[in-house]
Amino acid sequence: MNILFVQESDWLKKGPHQQHQLADRLSLRGHQILVIDYEINWRDRKSWELHSKRQIFSSVSKVYPTAKVTIIRPGIIKLPILDYVSLLFSHWCELKRQIKQFAPQVIIGFSILNSYLSAKIARQANIPFVYYWIDVLHRLIPFNLFRVIGKEMERRTLRQADKVLVINDKLRDYVIQLGSSPEYTQVLRAGIDIQQFDLTVDGSGIRNQYGLSKEDVVLFFMGWLYHFSGLKEVALQLTETNYPNIKVLIVGEGDAYEELQHIREKYDLQNQVILAGKKPYREIPAFIAASDICLLPAYPAEEVMQDIVPIKMYEYMAMAKPVISTRLPGIIAEFGEDNGVIYVRGPEEVVEKALDLVKTGNLSQLGLKARGFVEKYTWDNITDEFERILDEAVREKQK
């Protein structure tokens, strides 16, 4: 099957997320996968250019080395606001071109603008369009006016989609409220690779590399460092305690990275807050294995976090690690109260809660509960279901 993915993020530098896992696995099953993406962080590049040229990246793999995914990145005007205006034009042209050249049997959208375009073009070409929600994207738009426009475009795309997929029940409720048909809206959860996130993975090398002793209690976070991720508040808690053996190990990059560096230097926390930067995905299991407790300390009132379940939660839990999370509605609905996830009211309570858990001595028991909850959500099973949904969408369109 020829399958076209569209998104408004950088396929090469972001993730791996749900779409990367599924694209790589579908490629390994013999499907032809084409992605149209967008260089979302073009403003961060040191070199300057007024516009970018169309680029093609062949035989890309994000998760599984033998996967072969083709990425097409249409050119844009690299000026604020005009980047999105030019995206509408260049992605429209690219979509029309790929309808003829690649001849997709199904199109899957993970975005706002080019998903809106894809839904329209797919309907004209009688191709099924699947709208896949792993996040509430309009909430990430920084300007209120554009956020309203983005939400309206999502609403219209939902109404045109042949099928709508979401990664948790809370998100399903949200998209139905936004206008998605309950009949065509289905939950397809995130998954784990049991072979990769294996309990025999040894984290001692990571602990040695970063000078972590057996007595240290390591709190671990990975992912994009948003300002609302709560990590700055966790770091500042270390200045208020007399527990030098509490260490916070952070893997990732993003908006809050420089501020975290500043906190380390200002409060002399270089030995307690470890910023490891971005790491290859294949190294992540060892980092989690090196930790004692994993974290999701985002602000519970942050709108963008209300309905989502980050894939990192499944990966933390697959490694039999207890997770301290703020009381995010999507997380509570997904994992409940007795599956290895421990809740706090805000990021300011994380360190104290971690100390309490260490004192009770039941980290291993909590970790095994976490593993038991997620191990049924393997990527093999989820890819099987995704493949079935795509086949069904194609058959229904052909009737």
Image: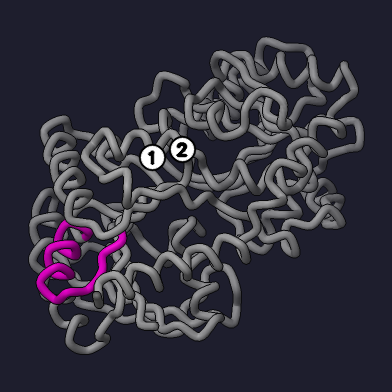
Residue 28 seen in the figure: yes
The answer to whether residue 226 of the structure is visible from this angle is no
Question: What x and y, as percent, mark residue 168?
Answer: 48, 41
Q: Which mark is on residue 147?
A: none
Does 62 sit left or right of 144 as displayed?
right
Q: Magenta region: which residues?
A: 115-130
Nearer the observer, 46 or 387: 387
Which x, y percent locates residue 183? 32, 48
Instruction: Please identify the dominant SS of the magenta region.
Output: helix
Question: How far across and down, in percent of the image, does residue 185 sit?
Answer: 35, 48
Q: Determine whether, in the image, residue 107 is placed left or right of residue 343.
A: left
**Which of the image's four quarters has the C terminus?**
bottom left
- Numbered disc 1: secondary structure: helix
Residue assigned mark 1: 172
Taking 60 as reference, is 174 above or below it? above
Which residue is depicted at the point 12% across and 63% down? Answer: 120
Three-letter code, disc 1: Arg
Q: Find residue 212 and report its image quarter.
A: top right
Rate crowding at label 2 as few (under 14), some (14 to 19) or many (20 or more) other CA atoms within 10 Å. some
Residue bearing the label numbered 2: 169
In the picture, the quarter occupied by the N terminus is: bottom left
